[in-house]
Image: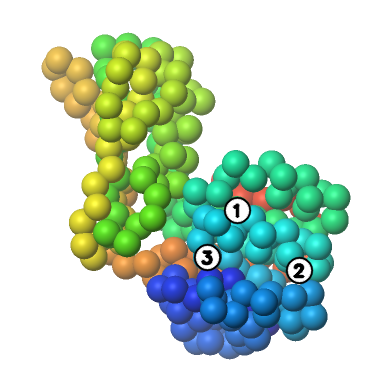
Amino acid sequence: MKIALLGYGKMGKTIEQLAIEKGHQIVLKITSENKAALTTNNLAKADVAIDFSRPETAFENIQRCLTSGIPVVSGTTAWLEHYEEACALCEEQNGAFLYASNFSIGVNIFFAINKRLAEMMNEQTAYDIELEEIHHTQKLDAPSGTAITLANGILENVDRKNKWTKEIKEVDTDLPIRSKRIDKVPGTHSINYSSEIDSIEIKHTAFTRIGFAKGALVAAEWIVDKKGVFNMNDVLGF
């Protein structure tokens, strides 16, 4: 498989290493210094594009891939005000687009557990809910895309919570997400349900970014020759 890497930071380099080990070929690498190289002609060399760029460039990258007929997998967060536009363009172009806030297979299992626990706790109104996420100091967005996905999974299933908030709960219907930035922490996410008599906590801890890169590569392998808008549930069959 021939891959275009859109974004060549730590994640891009890790994906490149894993892809080469699996016998894939990197045919295009786009950075902030060679953005002009993201052309239809250059993308045509690839079977699939993997985007781990920056929030301000992700949507443009996705647009270019879709209009060039190249399937694109994106793990960039904090650009989702344009997500529906990207989905509409994918349908218009009869293309293939997959977005995930986190490609780690373990995290996607954690997403499913989070939703199931939220369903079970909906009637248990004595329990309040908080989220905490910890990432490395180079993490650009806070809260993380993963934390927001977890929060949305709770909001979809717990009637007593109306919206997530950053750090502070102003009213009882708020679901606070507390963000910490600590050097060299790949990512830890925890959800706590607490009452006056006990607490229930679920947690996912990443040890390295390799899990994210492996999942992104699995998604890229999966999406080739497919048409439509997808997420990791489609890839993993959840």
Check disc 1 and give the amino acid type.
Tyr
Determine which residue is flagged by label 3.
Answer: 52
- Mark 2 burial class by Cα count in 10 Å: few <14, some 14-19, many 20+: many
Q: State the image coordinates of residue 167 (x, y, percent, origin top left).
A: 28, 32
The residue to which callout 2 is attached is 70
Rendering coords of residue 236 (x, y %)? 57, 54
Kindly identify the amino acid type of the residue bearing the numbered disc 3: Phe
| 203 on left or right of 165 | left
> Which of disc 2 and disc 3 is earlier in sequence?
3
Structural crowding at the residue carrying mark 1, measured as other residues with C-alpha within 10 Å and reported as few (<14), some (14–19) or many (≥20): many
**What distance separates the C-alpha of mark 2 from that of mark 1?**
14 Å
Looking at the image, residue 5 lies above or below residue 88: below
* Residues under numbered marks 2 and 1 in contact, where contact means CB atoms less than 8 Å apart: no
| Residue tagged 1 | 99
Residue under the point 37% across and 43% down: 143
Q: As drawn, which residue projects farthest toward the left?
A: 197
Residue placed at 29% from the left, 22% from the top? 169
